[in-house]
Image: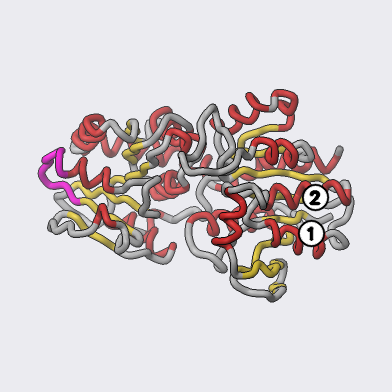
């Protein structure tokens, strides 16, 4: 029996938190005994490539056009052509006793492919939402105001074929159960956690008389990292140093900043990033600036837990804010609550408070390790396999 792991991205073929997370998830499935085959698009190529247990299926070169056709409803998803090609490739390879494990970071393509294979082969089909389906309704909200046909019919059509639906946030789980109460007994939540446990005792924090706060990751309208800079300016707190780590060159709100206490560092390889953070940073900053994104848990929250870093969050209501506040891992406010964020920074000036928060995180650290989190998911899959 095989576990066919369908994903739009995978490290090292693509960089970033999402591809790293998917590789971590697949690697952990292998550790607990699953015979896993990864299936993903071979972007920008017409070649089929097989590397060990990874099958890269030709995607082509017209993603922009495909995305437009998705928006107006000609395609169900920008991955439609890839789905068709991959279905033809897999339909004679997947067996009835196999499990299709389809992931989604917002796209419908992997859900659709899993549904088609379920129809053809009657294998088990598991859907794992890394993020909610883009332009579906989540707790009454939509991703943004850009034109896009509704995806409720497509979501229902393909999810009804699933044997198990796994979300990565309780907020998305609640939304799906509300929309599809008839599937209540097959919709579960499983937090990812951090990928590789860091031996933090190998590193030593560099002594500084400044409180050092870092924003890490994508620089865009959904994150608005400039919130941290605005808070820094308005707080007027002495001995405060702010870091932006990632590709900020083309992000206008952070351009033309000249301040000795504001540092910009380009994208760092993962291991180098972990070392830098634990040696130089006191607080991790995380932000999302859309109420819809309350159904998403930023992966950097898990990274900060791994590093034992207290957090300040500028977040919508949802799992990310709850994980920080309910577990006393830091202070999370609404993304538009600048005064609340200023107060959080001032509260962290107290070194005793900072150390207490750090101890809360370190005491809970093991339970957020992906190797431990995935045991819960493994129980679901084994029960599915036995039925």
> What's the residue at 55%, 43% (across, down)?
148
Dot placed on the residue nearer the N-terminal end, 1 or 2: 1
Q: Residues within 10 Å of mark 1 (few under 14, many from 20)?
A: some
Q: Residues within 10 Å of mark 2 (few under 14, many from 20)?
A: some
Q: Would you say residue 255 sits in the magenta stretch?
A: no
Secondary structure under badge 1?
Answer: helix
Q: Is residue 74 left or right of residue 306?
A: right
Quadrant assignment, res 34: bottom right
- Counting from the top left corner in percent of width and height, residue 43 is at 60, 68
Q: In the rendered structure, find residue 116 and report the number of the disc placed on it.
A: 2
- Counting from the top left corner in percent of width and height, residue 364 is at 46, 38
Q: In the rendered structure, find residue 226 and report the number of the disc placed on it.
A: none
Span of residues in magenta: 233-241
Q: How is the image coloured?
A: secondary structure
Q: Nearer the viewer, residue 82 or 9?
A: 82
- Counting from the top left corner in percent of width and height, residue 81 is at 70, 61
> What's the residue at 76%, 64% (across, down)?
85
Q: Nearer the viewer, residue 248 or 376?
A: 248
Q: Is residue 143 left or right of residue 334?
A: right
Q: Nearer the viewer, residue 250 or 241?
A: 250
> What's the residue at 44%, 62% (across, down)?
270
Q: How many marks?
A: 2
Residue at image mark 1: 87
Measured in 3D between alpha carbons, the distance from the residue under mark 1 to the one under mark 2, in whole angstroms, is: 7 Å
Quadrant in which the C terminus is drawn = top right
Quadrant assignment, res 68: bottom right
Q: Nearer the viewer, residue 324 or 79?
A: 79
Tag 1 and tag 2, C-beta contact below 8 Å: yes
> What's the residue at 30%, 63% (across, down)?
249
Q: Is residue 205 above or below residue 150?
A: below
Q: Is residue 6 left or right of residue 354?
A: right
């Amino acid at each position: 029996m095989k576990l066919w792991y369908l994903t739009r991205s995978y490290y090292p073929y693509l960089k970033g938190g999402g591809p790293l997370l998917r590789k971590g998830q697949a690697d952990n499935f292998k550790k607990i005994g699953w015979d896993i085959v990864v299936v993903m698009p071979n972007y920008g190529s017409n070649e089929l490539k097989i590397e060990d247990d990874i099958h890269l299926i030709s995607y082509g070169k017209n993603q922009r056009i495909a995305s437009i056709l998705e928006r107006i409803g000609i395609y169900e998803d920008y991955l439609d052509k890839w789905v068709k090609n991959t279905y033809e490739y897999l339909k004679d390879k997947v067996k009835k006793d196999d499990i299709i494990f389809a992931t989604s970071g917002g796209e419908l393509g992997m859900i659709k492919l899993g549904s088609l294979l379920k129809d053809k082969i009657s294998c088990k089909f598991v859907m794992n939402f890394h993020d909610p389906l883009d332009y579906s309704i989540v707790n009454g909200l939509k991703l943004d105001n850009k034109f896009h046909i509704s995806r409720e019919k497509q979501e229902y059509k393909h999810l009804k074929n699933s044997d198990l639906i796994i979300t990565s946030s309780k907020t998305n789980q609640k939304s799906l159960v509300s929309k599809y109460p008839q599937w209540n007994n097959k919709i579960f939540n499983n937090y990812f956690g951090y990928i590789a446990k860091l031996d933090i005792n190998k590193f030593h924090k560099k002594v500084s008389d400044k409180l050092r706060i870092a924003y890490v990751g994508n620089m865009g309208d959904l994150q608005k990292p400039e919130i941290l800079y605005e808070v820094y300016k308005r707080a007027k707190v002495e001995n405060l140093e702010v870091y932006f780590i990632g590709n900020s060159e083309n992000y206008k709100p952070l351009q033309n900043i000249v301040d000795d206490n504001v540092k910009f560092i380009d994208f760092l390889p993962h291991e180098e990033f972990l070392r830098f953070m634990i040696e130089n940073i006191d607080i991790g900053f995380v932000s999302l600036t859309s109420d819809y994104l309350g159904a998403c848990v930023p992966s950097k929250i898990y990274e900060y837990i791994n590093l034992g870093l207290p957090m300040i969050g500028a977040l919508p209501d949802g799992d990310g804010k709850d994980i920080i506040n309910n577990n006393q891992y830091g202070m999370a406010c609404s993304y538009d609550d600048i005064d609340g964020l200023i107060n959080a920074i001032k509260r962290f000036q107290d070194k005793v408070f900072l150390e207490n928060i750090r101890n809360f995180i370190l005491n809970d650290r093991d339970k957020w390790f992906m190797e431990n989190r995935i045991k819960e998911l493994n129980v679901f899959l084994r029960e599915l396999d036995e039925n």
